[in-house]
Amino acid sequence: MIVVLKHGVTEEKKQQLIAWLQALGLRIHISDGEFQTVLGLIGDTSSVDIDLVESLEIVDSVKRVTEPFKCCNRKFHPESLVVEIGDVKVGAGNFAMIAGPCSVESEEQIVSVAKSVKAAGATMLRGGAFKPRTSPYDFAGLKAEGLELLKIARKETGLPIVTELMNIMDLPLFDDVDVIQVGARNMQNFDLLRELGRLDKPILLKRGLANTLKELLMSAEYIMANGNERVMLCERGIRTFSDYTRNTLDLAAVPMLHQLTHLPVIVDPSHATGIAKLVPPMALAATAGGADGLIIEVHNDPIHALCDGAQSLRPEEFAELAEKVRSIRGIVA
């Protein structure tokens, strides 16, 4: 349920109403806008008399929310969320360029790529230390050593680091990671999502390869309901009947998610297509479609990459793409 207060309501009267609603066993999400305040009522609202609340002098309107996701619902939070990662801002017109290799392979490799993507305009560095692989025989990452190499690259460039957490048991290793990524395979690992909800750290939540938008939002709800509202969503392609690309990039998800939620939406054209030549056109299309950022795989030697070299851009290709992204942003922003 949503209670919209009239413009100019005093803080005292607002707090009196909130206290009364909390006494009914409800949690209250407060969104203070420039012209109105929205109270999102979370919990069993069946005991709330809508007519009574609507009749109060300070109340403008009352609406029931039928969607199961509440914390991440735009109706509860009309203004788009801005997630801050150090000096980097994402959402509400702030565009993120996240780039780096699929997996961290060596100090020389990750530092070289980090310097290249920063020079091209990247605002964050991605790199996998713990890698979920379909085959148990594939390279699964350097793990803790990979995290330390990412920190070295951050020290060299100043770029915040984005890397994937696969297991709750590894969470202590991620204390100094700037953004924790939840991969597609873990989107519905609810125990993991609950733990991430107890952190004060930005989370990049990837859509599962066979999950609906509602399921993605319910996964975000797990994180936010446990206290962490710094969530960014990622569309990374879904499995369809296509036999020429790894997945199908659901570009319509970007504007649809913007209607449903106030959370930033990042697009991953690398995993969506699996083919380096397709990454630039899909990245540009996502930018034109209103994405709040891109996460793109970049490797200094894709042919010899230990993971996903076929979908990785070379640094010079990323620089060319970044320039085109900036041009499109100048039109649509």
Image (cartoon, rainbow, N blue to C red):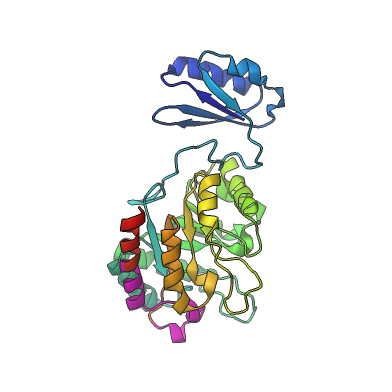
Q: Position of residue 116 (x, y in %)?
A: 31, 72
Residue 240: image quadrant is bottom right
Considering the image in quadrants, where does the N terminus appear?
top right
Q: Which residue occupies the foreground of this view, 176 or 216? A: 216
Q: Which residue occupies the foreground of this view, 275 or 230? A: 275
Vertical relation: 3 (above or below) 169: above
Vertical relation: 327 (above or below) 78: below
Q: Position of residue 257 (x, y in %)?
A: 54, 50
Q: Is residue 158 left or right of residue 129?
A: left
Please say whether residue 278 is visible from this viewpoint.
Answer: yes
Vertical relation: 121 (above or below) 229: below
Q: Position of residue 294 (x, y in %)?
A: 43, 62
Please say whether residue 128 is visible from this viewpoint.
Answer: no
Residue 82: image quadrant is top left
Residue 1 lies in the magenta stretch: no
Q: Is residue 322 left or right of residue 225?
A: left
Looking at the image, which residue is at 54% across and 51% down?
256
Looking at the image, which residue is at 64% across and 17% down?
51
Prevalent SS, magenta region: helix
Q: Residue furthest right?
A: 46
Residue 331: image quadrant is bottom left
Q: Position of residue 167 (x, y in %)?
A: 61, 61
Total tally of numbered discs in the picture: 0
Q: Residue furthest bottom?
A: 303
Q: Is residue 317 left or right of residue 144?
A: left
| Start-end of magenta stretch | 301-323
Residue 318 lies in the magenta stretch: yes
